[in-house]
Image (spheres, rainbow, N blue to C red):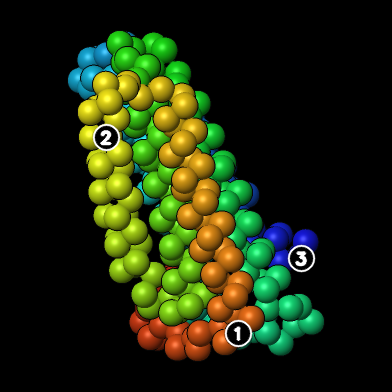
Amino acid sequence: MGALMKRELDSMHLASQYQNKLKAFIAVYGILGVGVPVFFWVLGPGVVGLMSGDMVNTSILVIGLIHSSQAISLHLFREDAHRQLTFLQTLPVRKPAIVHAKFTSVLLLSVFVIGWMFMVAGANTLLSDITVSDFWLAVGFFCSLIISTEAVVLLTYFTRGADRVNVMYWVSFAGWAVLFVLSGLFMKSLGKEPDSFVFIIYILVALFVYLFCWRLAVRRVNKRGFPQETGYKADQIQTIDSRGKGD
């Protein structure tokens, strides 16, 4: 299990696409950790004033969402292109262990991204004129969206294959957005402003969805095994591989 976890985490971050992984890691996560916050801070109301505090927070949260979805989807596409599920079944590991390793690794990545979003957006909220309720509402939506959509993506990957991942991502995205709007209207009808408790509720619901999809994926693999990997076409595999040929 430990070796599977290390394999998943090593291949999931965006820097794994490049030959010089250390250089790429510093570049990618240096930009995310320092460059992006400084860039938006300069453009925000504290300096240039081209962007409002709410717009800066939204931009930060969208970047976090894109980063997590891209890292995971590219990882799954590369896995399918090189038939990694088929390869892993030749090793002395149980099929549920493969599912557990991938779900655990994706959850860890999501927690890392959510922590980054929370700290950067929180700092911007303290430095700007953003109300606390707006902060909790925005962060609650994007953080819970990351967890819930990745749950559906992984369940789709283990039940239908990588070909359906993109479609189900957008279906789950739309479904969570609708649920979020309906819950917001319900809170408004009660005269309740979003706060940290609302944020916790969103995260708990998203975690419930994640654990439920995790359980379904394990049951599906135990009963029917992994879906057949058809792999990507030659030009698609070349496109994926070409991302790792540069420095």
Residue at left offset 43%, top offset 75%: 162
Q: In this view, does 85 lie above or below 18?
A: below
Q: In this view, does 233 lie above or below 156?
A: below
Q: Give the Cα distance between marks 3 and 2.
A: 43 Å
Q: Mark 1 points at which residue?
A: 223
- Residue 12 visible? The answer is no
How crowded pointer 1 is (Cα within 10 Å; few <14, some 14-19, many 20+) is rated as: few
Q: Position of residue 11 (x, y in %)?
A: 59, 62
Nearest the eye: 182 or 127? 182
Residue at left offset 51%, top offset 63%: 213
Query: Where does the N terminus fall, quadrant-wise?
Result: bottom right
Q: Give the Cα distance between marks 2 and 1.
A: 40 Å
Residue at left offset 30%, top offset 47%: 179
Q: Mark 3 points at which residue?
A: 1
Q: Mark 2 points at which residue?
A: 186
- What amino acid type is highlighted by mark number 2? Phe
- What amino acid type is highlighted by mark number 3? Met
* Front: mark 3 or 2: 2
Residue lying furthest left: 50
* Front: mark 1 or 3: 1
Q: Give the Cα distance between marks 1 and 3.
A: 21 Å
Relative horizontal placement of residue 111, taking residue 38 as reference (left or right)? right
- Residue 139 visible? The answer is yes
Residue lying furthest front: 190
Q: What element carries label 3?
A: loop
